[in-house]
Image (tube, rainbow, N blue to C red):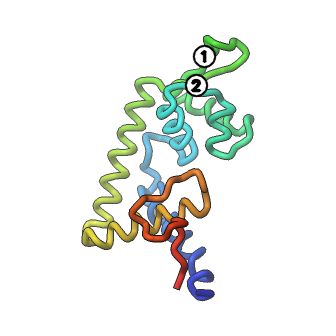
Amino acid sequence: MRKNMRELPRLLQEAAWLFGNRAFDGACCGGLSFFEYQALARIELAESCSIQEVGDALKFTKSGATRIIDRLERKGYARRRRSPRDGRVCCVTVTSQGKKACSQVKEDYDAYIGNSLRGLDARTLKLIKDALSALLSAVKPSVPVNSEVSSPTGREPFS
């Protein structure tokens, strides 16, 4: 168990490196940084949200989120507007150009992952998916664990 626990950080870092936007050799994401893409995807999912909500979702301060939104606006991917319910709140929405960029990033990344994992059989892919779901559940309790994970806690022990 200790050996697996010692090796896990290195494996996670290597996976993040290989499956992160670095893998696209800087040509990724319609000119978006990883954090800009994450913010844009969160805003698109919510359809409209406050800058504070973007910061909370990404674990950034409001000023950090504001800088990301500034960059998204300059690129034409997002737009600020006053909340119709509360004029003190600034809401952010995704522009049609931003929606296209999000869609293209998702399509490109799905193709990249599919191509990278094409040699794996269905059983192995399911094991990877279940392990990643359990891992995310362990570090971020709000992420639901796939119901097919056998452990009632959603956490499989390392062996």
Left or right of 8 in this view: 23: left
Please count the marks in the image: 2
Pick whichever, 123 or 95, lies toward us. Answer: 123
- Amino acid type, label 1: Arg
Q: Nearer the viewer, residue 6 or 27?
A: 6
Q: Mark 2 sits on what residue?
A: 92
| Secondary structure category for the residue under label 1 | strand
- Which residue lies under the disc numbered 1? 81
Q: Residue at x 63, y 15 (%)?
A: 83
Q: Residue at x 73, y 15 (%)?
A: 88
Between 63 and 147, the residue placed more toward the observer is: 147
The residue at 41%/35% (across/down) is 101
Q: Please say if 105 is above or below 26.
A: above
Crowd tier of the residue under label 1, counting other residues whose Cα lies within 10 Å: few below 14, some 14–19, many 20 or above: few
What amino acid is at disc 2? Answer: Val
In the displayed structure, 126 sits above or below 88; it is: below
Residue found 44% across the figure and 44% down from its top = 29
Q: Is residue 22 visible?
A: no
Q: Are marks 2 and 1 in contact (CB under 8 Å)?
A: yes
The quadrant of the rendering that contains the N terminus is bottom right
Answer left or right for 84 relative to 154. right
Badge 2, how many Cα within 10 Å: few under 14, some, many 20+? many
**Residue 51 appears in the rendering:** yes
Q: Is residue 21 above or below residue 90?
A: below
Q: Position of residue 57 (x, y in %)?
A: 62, 42
User: Which x, y percent locates residue 106?
Assistant: 38, 45
Q: Position of residue 126 (x, y in %)?
A: 34, 67
Position of 25 with respect to 87 (left or right) is left
Report the Cα–Cα distance between label 2 and label 1. 6 Å
Q: Earlier in the sequence, mark 2 or mark 1?
A: 1
